[in-house]
Amino acid sequence: MSLDRTDVDKIAHLARLQIEEQDTPEYAQNLSNILDLVDQMQAIDTTDVSPMAHPLDAVQRLRSDLITEENQRENLQSVAPAVENGLFLVPKVIE
Amino acid sequence: MFDKTLAELANGLKTGEFSSVELTQAYLKRIKAEDKKYNSFITVTEEQALQQAQAADQQIAAGSAGLFTGLPIAHKDIFCTKGVRTSCASKMLDNFISPYDATVVDKFNQAGAVTLGKTNMDEFAMGSSNESSFYGPSRNPWDTDRVPGGSSGGSAAAVSAQLAPAATGTDTGGSIRQPAALCGITGLKPTYGRVSRFGMIAFASSLDQGGPMTKTAEDAAMMLNVMAGFDKQDSTSVDREVPDYTAELDRPLNGLRIGLPKEFFVDDMDSAIAAQTQAAIKEFEKLGATVKEVSLPNTALSIPAYYIIAPAEASSNLSRFDGVRYGYRCENPVDLEDLYKRSRGEGFGTEVKRRIMVGAYALSEGFYDAYYNKAQQIRRLIRDDFAQVLNDVDVIMGPTTPHPAFQLGEKTSDPVAMYMEDIFTISLNLAGLPGMSVPCGTVNGLPTGLQIIGDYFAEQKLLNVAHQFQLATDWHTQSPQGI
Amino acid sequence: MEWEAVIGLEIHAQLATKSKIFSGASTAFGAEPNTQACAVDLALPGTLPVFNEEALRMAVKFGLAVDAEIGRKSVFDRKNYFYPDLPKGYQTSQLFHPIVGIGHIDITLEDGTNKRIGVTRAHLEEDAGKSLHDEFPGMTGIDLNRAGTPLLEIVSEPDMRSAEEAVAYVRKIHSIVTSLGICDGNMAEGSFRCDCNVSIRPKGQEEFGPRTETKNINSFRFIEKAILGEIDRQIDLVEDGGQVIQATRLYDADKNETRSMRSKEEANDYRYFPCPDLLPIVIDEDYIEAVRATLPELPDARKARFINEYKLSEYDAMVLSGDHHTADYFETVANAASDAKIAANWVMGELSKMLNQNDTHIKDSPVTAEQLGGLLERIKDDTISGKIAKQVFEVMWSDGGSADEIIEAKGLKQVTDSGAIEKIVDEVIANNSAQVDQYINAEPDKRGKMIGFFMGQVMKASQGKANPGQVQGMLKQKLDALVS
């Protein structure tokens, strides 16, 4: 599997990552090498093998429907880059 | 004093040989003097450490001290520490003061431990050399031109250089065991779910597990006694009784059945490492163990499966770093997309971006079955291999790494070559099994590790096996030159 | 060409849990921005989700109510996309293994016919926060109080062929979730929102045309308008030689119109995969049966009972069982008044009129069911007439008080004393000799109608308080006596 510049741009956009243009070829090369590595998997027949998402066959535990969290806005927003009137600010979103 | 184990230091505190404040001051002084060489700490929490040490001394004086009270340790900078920068070695979180404590940190605080600081690591735990840290690489105390391994390289270097008697680490594909091996210390990756992941910044959620990095197996048992346990804040945490991990250390190894997978001895590994592993096995035979060759046929597939599953989970886990609520935000974003792309593009390093892109690609439309689903199927094959072997043997052993510590910069340009260094460690993470690395020799003056793998929740057994090995050998007591 | 519309709906119902689906923060509406967004809701590094058992129970209740398969093993997946009101950069949802599988409901149309609509699935997911676009120049403010509120997304089959059917379906789902008590159904606050997928095709054609999706509509009226408008728009477009382009349209609540999204339409690639922070939810038969045992009476069953027990007409029963607040109200009134027919008339008549005029929901009615029941009791026992009752009701609405208190205070008690009534009747007959003469000279079969005039005079003279039945009888008797 070989990725080109366009593929890298597409993936970078999907992942919202700015990649400098001069770095794109190296990313393309490295990503292609990684994909070659993982393509070894394709040689193995996994028909009838069910995928394993978790190491242990455990099931989800349930939490009681209780309010356990108090307002911590000041503490939690102390690390925010831009806040006004309790709202997180981002550049204007156009829908 | 700095060569003392946690167990010995605990005894010294108890007998009044020294106070926790004295101990802490000594370590802080040593870090200040020596860490320039190793860059093993990102943040040293001097003030907080001394406060904790004072409180510990009061507890000791009052007779209300626990087994861990007053013992200094370091935390990998992946664990959230309230009021202290928690960076994950990333520019993205360089300004992030965590508003809360990770469960592991909280447990150590409750036990009366003293936090010396936060250790260096690969950025977001993605790496096997510590070279992807925003704060510069940590260096191997055995040879400072070489890597300490990763991702918990700072923790390994700090313990090896005796800047901390013990440290926490996390292991997603070998990130405790590999640096432990490369720095000549003891490291334990517990069973998935044994240690809470709450507050441990996620790399790959289904693989990540916190664990101890120490001088000895006995110390690892002491650490795990504090770290392990059910946490209702972590859905993947296992609600299962925590045994006293020190209780079985002295059990003799008569009749221990050891499996030696033939796949753990590969052509392109360092032959001296293979020989040392065999020598270590001989020691176990002397201790009464029996050894047989076993097979884990899908071992080679663990690398491709891992390098799909881990990046896929990571690509999603790291989406929260978007410059909106915390962390790095680029200067003067012109619009929302610019805010996202530049904050993430500038805030993440190359390896992190690479893995996010691999993960995003593997999950994208049209590729899910060929990559992600396939990898999860192979994951089951790997788990089944282990299950079958562990029916016949008590523990599986082999080398932790195929090579000793490599040179800084040697593999940075070739990510795939770097990934191959994880060949023996990552299959355990895929299966969720516990594993340890203990020092078992040196190659050209560089330490090497023996990996010991057990069944789910067999940490007690692993610690027992490792402790008996350390009673019979002295590899774990060897220090880098000049330390 | 004759066109046929194909409509499928996705309804997002906020589940009425106290805390969020994956955290212990409150879900209460209307708090100060970000005061109900905890570390987990803000997706702080290292935080993890733990699933709320009540959200599960509520979803299973819904599944049982629409006769659906319940997922014995359901799994949370991550839907990955970037948006500032989505703190983790993914929404935790269920794509591959939803908690509720295939089910169905029956809707009743205006012409009285029933139609079965398929429910494809219903899955649990977390709500996003809110983006406030107008508070700061050039900036958008993000409030994450709503982030993590549990949602049940209910997906229909594309079984509806008209706006009327679509609205009937939405009303029915609304009625089910509110009856179950799993959603407060408050559309204005966004607790119950609807995405409409609309396409057209030539009648008789099998395959579907390209569809548009109009998102986040939060009123029944607008669902109808949006669908009607969209059908017309598509037909016009195609008949003018154009093509419908698959697209997402936005509902603008302020302007009450849809518009296409301004941002450049990207092919979405959500990169779904099972959430590794959450484990599969496994439930067994015992759990399901225990939930089934707690199910309240559902709208269809209640309607049937209203017909049987209260002898209501099909139509009245449908209207009164459509909303559980209305149904509860009606039953309380009917029992207090011991007369279902009069209770139904009043709830659907006078009460409904006042609620509409004042834009008030029945659950907030200033006149309680007990008050209204007391009032109707006084009609039944002839204390007041129906007409006086309306006056009493108006006082009740504006000033409160029981029927007896108001009747007493305003002196509205009906006059049943036959001596008093006779006196007024005699006066009216004496004062209207012209009309009396007309009565006497009229054909006998016209006389009945003419009594109305005298009735009016007597009631007027008694200020409406004379018992109409008694007045009627007495007038007839006295006037007929004059004829012979």
Image (cartoon, coloured by chain):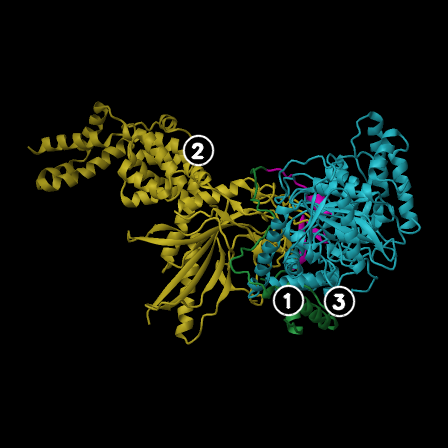
The amino acid marked with disc number 3 is Asp
Q: Is residue B157 left or right of residue C207?
A: right
Q: Name the residue tied to disc 1.
A: A11
Q: Is residue A87 magenta?
A: yes
Asked where in the image residue B114 lies, by quadrant, the reply is top right
**Residue A35 percent across, percent down from the top left:** 65, 67
The amino acid marked with disc number 1 is Ile
Question: For numbered disc 3, what is the local secondary structure?
Answer: loop
Q: Is residue C11 magenta?
A: no
Discs 2 and 1 carry the same chain letter: no
Question: For numbered disc 2, what is the local secondary structure?
Answer: helix
Subunit that carries the residue with mark 2: C
Asked where in the image residue B301 lies, by quadrant, the reply is bottom right
Discs 3 and 2 carry the same chain letter: no
**Colour chain C is painted in:** yellow
Q: Name the residue tied to disc 2.
A: C399
Residue at (33, 31) in percent of width and height: C335
Query: Can I make out residue A50 in this image?
Result: yes
Q: Name the residue tied to disc 3.
A: B414
Q: Quadrant of the N terminus of chain C?
A: bottom left
Tell which chain the image draws in green: A
For the residues labelled 3 and 2, the Cα–Cα distance comes to 83 Å
Q: Which residues are magenta?
A: A67-91
Q: Is residue B384 left or right of residue A28?
A: left
Question: For numbered disc 1, what is the local secondary structure?
Answer: helix
**Colour chain B is painted in:** cyan
